[in-house]
Amino acid sequence: MPPVAPTFAASPAGPSPDTPKDPAYTPPPEPSFRPAGESWVWFTSMGLAIGLVMILGLLGLIISNGLAVFWPKPVVQVQLVEGSQAGIRGSPTFGGEHVKTQEKRVTQLDEDGKPLPPAYEYQFYVANRDAYGFSFKYIDRKEVLAITHPANAIVAERFSLGTAIFLPRELRPFESAAIPGDSPEFIPTLERLVQAGNERRREIRQIERHQIGAINRELSRLHLQRRALEHGPNPPADAPARLAAIDARAATLQAEFEGLAARARQLRERQAADTLSYVTLSGAERVTPVAEILDFTLPNQLGFFGKLREFVVRFWKFLSEEPRAANMEGGIFPAIFGTFVMTLLMSVAVTPFGVLAAIYLREYAKQGLFVRCVRIAVNNLAGVPSIVFGVFGLGFFVYMVGGSIDQLFFSLSLPTPTFGTGGVLWASATLALMTVPVVIVSTEEALAAVSRGSREGSLACGASKWQTIQRIVLPASLPGILTGLILAMARGAGEVAPLMLVGVVKLAPTLPIDGIPPFVHLERKFMHLGFHIFDLGFQSPDSEAAKPMVFATTFLLILLVVCLNLGAILIRNHLRKKYKVSTF
Amino acid sequence: MALARPSDFAHASAPAPGTFNPAYIQVKNFSFYYGHNKVLHSLALDIPERQVTAFIGPSGCGKSTLLRNLNRMNDLIDGVRHEGDITVGGRSIYDPLLEVIALRKRIGMVFQKSNPFPKSIYENVVYALRVAGRNGKSELDEVVERSLRGAALWDEVKDRLHESAFGLSGGQQQRLCIARAIANRPEILLMDEPCSALDPIATSKVEELIHELKKEFTIVIVTHNMQQAARVSDRTAFFYLGKLIEYAATPDIFMNPKNPQTEAYVSGRFG
Ligand SMILES: Nc1ncnc2c1ncn2[C@@H]1O[C@H](COP(=O)(O)OP(=O)(O)O)[C@@H](O)[C@H]1O
Ligand SMILES: [Mg+2]
């Protein structure tokens, strides 16, 4: 060390407290208490906060609106001011469920053209579409004289005409004397009759859907057999005998069919026999068969727990029932099931495909220009509009593959297509194609993350490359592969546009999986929650009435995606624990 | 050729006790390139059977590269090239008729960083047998016990054979890797700085183990630690910048080096 020069005393490390101050010394700049780059941290957190607020807001809106649909609301009767023309067909009263109060959209002006203070209006859900021709009504607050809560108001869910809100007048059972609306007998009797009607409806459905359906299936099978015998290339020697047997069997089936049809007709007649007469809250008197009513409540008499029970019942019905009345009423079970089956099938199709492609790209292909181009192409595939995949699926899967399958295996039923038309199988295949880039990219990343050490350890034990991939690399990258699958599922389950071309329908009479052999019918068309939302919101006759259903359906679609993802995440966490990286 | 048996290496008859083949592994004028970068320069050395041979030298001098060539582990790297030859038991390891998998079955390897598989202790040990298609339960059980005893780990893990290998300590994991490497009874054991990530107690256990294993296996060990080389090895090769500077019996290298570079290195003056 050279001797310390005097100017060196104030070394760059700064003056020590006992060093005399050197005039040549300039102190370093005042230290800033804000670390460099702090403002950028704030920026990033702001970005996160805005994103979170938007996502949570959207979810909150969907969940609250979606669930509010099922909560029973009180029914009010509105008394209008003297001489008001705002009633329904001039009636002095009307009623329904209060939906909202809002400022009037059109601002009123006084004589001088100055705006008047804002006026308010109420929106009511008046139901009784069959009687009024609409189900929502706006009313200016100035027109309202009084609002009452009639205790005996009934909200009834009907089979085909939508909801009715009314005051009971008289029940006329087929088997006993009429019961007036104010009798204590009234509600229990109505309940009993509604239940009996529901049971009869189930029986009719059982007959028409299942028993007659089975007969129809057998008849069309016989028809195909007959065609094969008559027009087949080389008819067997016993063809006439077999034709006779087919005719005999068809005649028996026909007789069975007549019997069942007669029973169904008889039940239908009985359904019309019990009638209920009621008055709407605007005073119109109407009569309906009791069997038309599926379920009813007296919302103004329900306590909190009564409402809660009703909420659960309605929610469950929405989950488990089939849609009615142009999808505006009833549940959405077929759509939930269709979405679920399609998403599962898509995952089953996309995983092996994507994983094998990624293994080849990462482990076997010689890394060069060509592989780089393939990788770029795969990534860009994720940016192709989904409708293009739909068009491709229609051309390739439906017409080419499906058409060829029909030619080869189902030629007897042509020209009616079996696989040569949209169906859940082709929809899944199309979506699998659409989501395969996601799986390839995440699998490649997972494979690349497996340490060189474990690969070499395996090779040093005398394992071949494939054995190493199969026994060491793939298990270790399973969590990453599952992450890709989760992303693919979320994307696939929410997709609508391509599905409209390859098999989604507004109303599917049957489910893709049911109790009729061979149990899994992948050629069938299916319903889908995403398409259901589109259909309800934009294709239904009364979009105002459909709005709550849109929210409820959206809520369920999100719930389904969350459930599927949770399932995959649970599996992934289990695997992570199993293959967690080594720590000393 | 499906499976190379020991006879492939021409030493079917084990040498009599106390005798050994002094040139079991022969490195003949061997050069090695990573792309255009020549990292081994015409090496020539004979490695004796059932002895411990240590490779020492400063970092980057090519010790690992040579070691990893003995079981052709470097074949995996793109753009590598070699000149010269390496024979094991008189047979070239680059013989196109010899499958590299069969070669690796005869040559176990222990890495610098312990690399147990994400499997149970049991499955780690029997991995080499499983990939060879040997799945008999009684055979596997026997191999597990023998190998873990061989790696001085049996008493510590015999009650938790079916738990994850990641539950073991660092030293135990390294001994598990040794057990895995000897499970299929290879003839040669390559060790690349096996103790560099271990604490002194674990290190001394592994060193004791090397003494034991010498009775059965030909061991080649790369080490950074000169005391370790002096303690465990019979012969030592000193490399510098990809060249073999000196190769002799260990006491000679440490007490009586012929080359001034060797002397400088073993006396700690550079490296
Ligand atoms: N995979 C590789 N690709 C290219 N060069 C490498 C690779 N591995 C090692 N090298 C180079 O080869 C030389 C020898 O490395 P190595 O054998 O690992 O040395 P040592 O084990 O003696 O420290 C070093 O210069 C190193 O940079
Ligand atoms: Mg090294």
Image: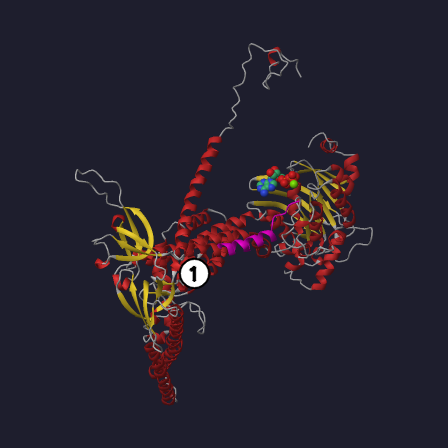
Please tell me which residue is depicted at 29% across the width and 60% down the height of the picture.
A281
Whether residue B225 is visible to the viewer of this picture, yes or no, is yes
Residue sitting at the far top: A23
Q: Residues within 10 Å of mark 1 (few under 14, many from 20)?
A: some
User: In what quadrant of the picture does the N terminus of chain A appear?
Assistant: top right
Q: x, y (%) of residue A518? A: 45, 73
- Which secondary structure class fits the magenta region best? helix
Q: Is residue B39 left or right of residue B265?
A: left
Taking the magenta stretch, the answer to whether it contains residue A583 is: yes
Q: x, y (%) of residue A234? A: 37, 84
Residue labelled with disc 1: A310
**Depth order, front residue of A457/B67:** A457
Q: Secondary structure at mark 1?
A: helix
**Depth order, front residue of B262/A266:** A266
Taking the magenta stretch, the answer to whether it contains residue A189 is: no
Vertical relation: A26 (above or below) B139: above
User: Which stretch is magenta?
Assistant: A565-584
